[in-house]
Image (cartoon, grey):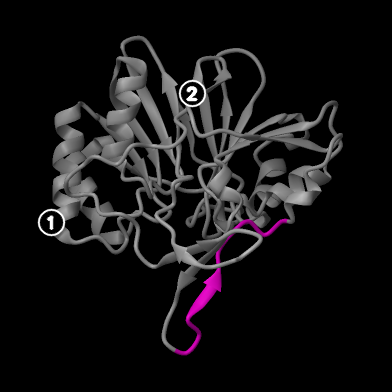
Amino acid sequence: MRITILSEDTAHANLVGEHGFSAYIEPDSGEPILFDTGQGMAIRYNAPLLGIDLSKVNTVAISHGHYDHTGGLFYLLSLPRERALEVYLHPSALHDKMAEIGETLKYRFVGIPLNPGLFRTGDAFLRQETEPVELGNGLILTGEVPRRCEFEEPPKGFVSATAPDFIFEHDHIPDDQSLIIPRDGWFALISGCGHAGIINTLEYAAELTGKQPRIVIGGLHLISASEERIAKTVERMKEMGVEKVYLGHCTGWKALRAFEDAYGEGFKRLHVGMRIEI
């Protein structure tokens, strides 16, 4: 199985980076799957340069409803394809989402930059799921992740609202989910941002599969985490059996350095165009 990074904050050579995440997954057999879509510019520009035809993608899994993971949906919908696009997401991903940014301009919109009405019959089907879903070829979308880890705090600084009242309340981002790639006796996990907490997510994935984690790929949203939480996260992942980490996006420089120090050759900094064989 091969994973190609199409959208990420860092890019090499002639590829385009952006604040976002998207991974193109070629399973052992069957059709490719796209996990997240970045903001949209990166997948549109990078895919052809990497020899990837996104019109052949019929299944998209969304980690959560933020613009830097969903902005490419509009481009995907514009592509001719043999059948309707299937988009798997948690119902809360469709809420109006805002983030606190300061005192003068209190909030900014960070939700899906796409009218859900565009998902009409014939173009795409929204698969709104809260429970784990098998996407084929053994790939499992975790669904909503239980939050049990004692040191993983709920997300801060986010609010969301829904029709018809549109009253904004704290958003702990229940829509955050990850993709499990089961292998023989172990699994790899792809995390978009890990707002649910990477330890919460790995422990839940272990429960679902009966296997132990060995590889973690993606963003862990430790960008504003304390040094104590970062240290505990690294330690717990080591204890769980994680051997390799491919990290970037919202992980944060302090956390990236901590993982690099702890994992040595087992650490890789993500970049657009990186191909990971599992």
Q: State the image coordinates of residue 128 (x, y, percent, origin top left).
A: 61, 36
Residue at x 26% of width, y 35% of height: 266
Membership of 38 in magenta stretch: no
Identify the element where label 1 is drawn.
helix
Q: How many marks?
A: 2
Q: Is residue 224 above or below residue 60?
A: below
Q: State the image coordinates of residue 106 (x, y, percent, origin top left).
A: 47, 81
159 with respect to 79 (left or right): left
Magenta segment, which residues?
Answer: 104-114
Q: Is residue 154 above or below residue 240?
A: below
Report the predominant secondary structure element of the magenta stretch.
loop
Residue at x 35% of width, y 35% of height: 216
Tell me, for residue 140, which label it has, or none. 2
Q: Nearer the viewer, residue 210 or 5?
A: 210
Q: Is residue 278 visible?
A: no
Residue at x 86% of width, y 34% of height: 122
Mark 1, other Cα within 10 Å: few <14 / some 14–19 / many ≥20: few
* Residue named by callout 1: 228
- Which of the image's four quarters has the C terminus? top left
Rendered image quadrant of residue 214: top left
Residue type at numbered disc 2: Ile
Q: Is residue 117 above or below residue 62?
A: below
Is label 2 in contact with label 1 (beta carbons under 8 Å)?
A: no
Residue at x 54% of width, y 55% of height: 66
Q: State the image coordinates of residue 180 (x, y, percent, origin top left).
A: 43, 26
Q: Disc 2 to disc 1, how far (Cα)?
A: 31 Å
Rendered image quadrant of residue 18: bottom right
Membership of 108 in magenta stretch: yes
